[in-house]
Amino acid sequence: MQRIRLRYTKRGRLRFTSHRDFQRAFERALRRSEVPMAYSAGFTPHPKVSYANAAPTGTGSEAEFLEIALTEPRDPASLRESLDASMPDGLDIVEAVEARTSGLADRLTASVWELRLDGVGLPEARQAVAAFLAAETVEVERRTKNGLRTFDARAAVVRLEALDGAFEGAADRPGLGACAILRLVVRHSTPAVRPDDVLSGLRATADLAPPVPAAVTRLAQGLLNEETGTVTDPLAPDREAVTAAPPTAAGLTAATGGSPARGGVPEGSA
Amino acid sequence: MPVESVFPRLEALLPHVQKPIQYVGGELNSTVKPWDSCDVRWALMYPDAYEVGLPNQGVMILYEVLNEREGVLAERTYSVWPDLEALMREHRVPQFTVDAHRPVGAFDVLGVSFSTELGYTNLLTTLDLAGIPMETADRTEEHPVVLAGGHAAFNPEPIADFIDCAVIGDGEQAVLEITGIIRAWKAEGRPGGRDELLFRLAKTGSVYVPKFYDVEYLPDGRISRVVPNRSGVPWRVAKHTVMDLDEWPYPKQPLVPLAETVHERMSVEIFRGCTRGCRFCQAGMITRPVRERSITGIGDMVEKGLKATGFEEVGLLSLSSADHSEIGDVAKGLADRYEEDKIGLSLPSTRVDAFNIDLANELTRNGRRSGLTFAPEGGSERIRKVINKMVSEEDLIRTVATAYGNGWRQVKLYFMCGLPTETDEDVLQIADMATKVIAKGREVSGKNDIRCTVSIGGFVPKPHTPFQWAPQLSSEDTDARLEKLRERIRGDKKYGRSIGFRYHDGKPGIVEGLLSRGDRRVGAVIRAVYEDGGRFDGWREHFSYDRWMSCAEKTLPGFGVDVDWYTTRERAYEEVLPWDHLDSGLDKDWLWEDWQDALDETEVEDCRWTPCFDCGVCPQMDTHIQIGPTGKKLLPLTVVK
Ligand code: B12
Ligand code: SF4
């Protein structure tokens, strides 16, 4: 059995795809591209796909991960291409590597998020960020299936900074003008602290109230480097293992690269 | 000039609504064409929520047929839920298409597909959100032509004020013909404005433009006549019929939604039309004659469709799928082909007499063996003769015995309540039938966990059927009759617990009845209901009977009629019916005779297998029956890796 790990995106309008919607679309894509999937045993067999930490509905992502199990080996690069062609634009399959190491999930310990706050000025955003970071704990509320839940949004935040987003074309958005961008590194914890929890925290500590909903995108996910506050590419160990060891099946070429996240956080790329 | 996308404005509202994915489009196999590359632009609408509208085959077919043409574009729009509607009103975001999020008001045509009358209030919401004046009289050249199609359009009179025109029958060729007329009129610089365009459409004799017809009434409220009010407009408007389904293998690239929808399968229409002659069935009457898709045509569509979609299930769609002349070979051929791929097959409900166990086995071979559904429709032998559903109780018992004997545990039976001439006794016999089914099931399977679910719908008389003259049963009588049935089932110590009972109260049926056989005066009720907040009438949680009744009480007395007049009143032979000028091909005298035969409990055969009984359709529409068998088989597909 061959296992392949994929990185995919939720871009543009398709960020409104829920995880369930994505799953169904992905499983259809597997059938369209005739991937020799391994099936679970049982009364209603399911193709073996493991998903990790899906981004919430409505947030974009450049760094979602999943792993599939195949009954026959396939070249990851061409598999990626045909799967990507079978998915709607925006749900793009951007990377595929053969799993050579254990525990992808163990290497997903933190996320890097970008929050675009149209209509919020940089000074205002900086001030709010400073207040948030200065607090020991920031209690926020979230509505869950079991009612309103209160928890700390501060501890999981490893880094938070405000950048000026105005030069990224905000000037031609009439009426808005100002635009601040928050760059957030958050540790995966239980309960999970999501970007909107951090936004609630900013409102709680500094009254920051963006006039339009923030556009949120996950830029990267990976193993947290506690010292630098950055995350490393979770697929890198598999890729390195492939270059170090010969491929599993004769004639298969390993997929390499194309990953903007390779080697760590795309720092300063904005 | 390109039309701007409203998406940036809509996007800001989406985080605040339920299931935003339904509004973003981008489905697999959807099409966006550059605005300026086209000179005729269609917005196609299914006037219900996305989850119901997206899988609709009619819209999907027309979308593809139009988009395949050079210079023509078609985009889709669906009803938005009240949460988004409120936000759109507040932020002045107009009704949009999900494909390119263009405002619906900017298109040349808004084509709306009505498979049920319960979409009428949603039409008004859409018009208002789109900034299109609610009534045809107030529209100008700036506004799209509002065109109705689908089965309910066979009596568009209740929405005559709100639409500009209607097409009855198959849409494939009709939309192309209309496109041609619009293109020519635009190219000539829109001579004569909107009226001239509508006139050119009306002149063809196959597009109905209500405002070119005057309806005159008798003092007692009945219609005296419907007359064209300008010369050149034909007295009657004919339905469209597509022949040779193999030449129209649509949809070729079915849409694959991201959002969850009511149907997640690749559907292939295996034939159109039905001549079984069930007297309550409007669909069967208005889609004559039967036109089969060949076994190889079906195989081709399935193969391409599955490739294009990745669906896991194939639905073999039609009005009575087990009647296809080669259904056995179709089912077996497909089950063989897709055995490896775990592709399931399904048919909409099966006629009792057309059921055979080999077919049922093929259908469940690659999937789950859940339950079997049959529709005897009438509880007693007598009432089944009235409705021309020619199945005997023995047929049914034999059929279910085979099913239970072959491992099925659950059978679902559909019935109607309120059929013409029906008495309590006819309905109570449903309980007897169900107990016999259970008894037989226990006997042949040797098990006690046999179940039978009885599902009952209220009968609503429909235009263009032999029952178009029939009185509808009042909701009180319907409820009382069903209550008696429920007691009878509950009181059965031995079998009662094995029988499931599902029914709806009679109230929604009365509203459906009002809209089905309504005339232009009913438009005032629809408008009042819409203005009072009526939306999504097909949904229990949104439907309000009381609202419909109070709006009817406010509007109808002015015309000297009321809801009973439209629903529970029996019509006489001489009465001019509101839809008489819309020609479904059925000869009105033949329909009347069939109504009389119904009252005499006389049955009529199927013209596929017996000589033509002169329903009128084929000579009137210049069509003929197209059926197999072709004798061909579905060969295994060569595996290309
Ligand atoms: C699949 C199906 C469903 C599915 C999917 C519905 C969907 N979203 O499409 C489900 C299970 C959800 C369903 C539900 C219901 N259904 Co249903 N359904 C069918 C079925 C089996 C197939 C429909 C189909 O795809 N036909 C094929 C397409 C190509 O035909 P079409 O839509 O009519 O389109 C053609 C023309 O009408 C025309 N056309 C259509 N729209 C337009 C628009 C324009 C502008 C133009 C020019 C032309 C045009 O062009 C098309 C191509 O030729 C039919 C039976 C049948 N075989 O038709 C029943 C049928 C349509 N359903 C029916 C009913 C009653 C219902 C319900 C009201 C049942 C209920 N009581 O809840 C609900 C209503 C749901 C809703 N709100 O729409 C009835 C309609 C009653 C009637 N006219 O007599 C039918 C005919 C079954 C029957 N024999 O009674 N249904
Ligand atoms: S005209 Fe004759 S053959 Fe054609 S549908 Fe009617 S009964 Fe059948």
Image (cartoon, helix red, strand yellow):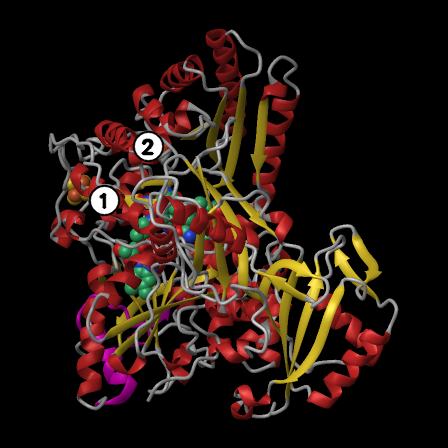
Q: Position of residue B85 (x, y in %)?
A: 57, 71
Query: Which of the two discs, 2 and 1, labels the residue nearer the N terminus?
Result: 2
Query: From the viewer's perspective, is A73 left or right of B208?
Result: right
The boundaries of the magenta stretch are: B191-220
Q: Residue at x 41, y 15 (%)?
A: B406
Q: Residue at x 43, y 68 (%)?
A: B98
Q: Quadrant of residue A200?
A: bottom right
Question: In the depicted view, which residue is nearer to us: A182 or B15?
Answer: A182
The verdict on label 1 being within 8 Å of ligand 2 is no
Residue B462 seen in the current view: no
Q: Position of residue A140 (x, y in %)?
A: 82, 65
Provide the secondary structure element on which disc 1 rests.
Answer: helix
Magenta segment: does it hold B213?
yes
Q: Position of residue A247 (x, y in %)?
A: 38, 44
- Please give the chain letter of the residue carrying mark 2: B
Q: Which residue is mark 2?
A: B388
Residue A203 seen in the current view: yes
Query: From the viewer's perspective, is A115 left or right of B538?
Result: right
Quarter occupied by the C terminus of chain B: top left
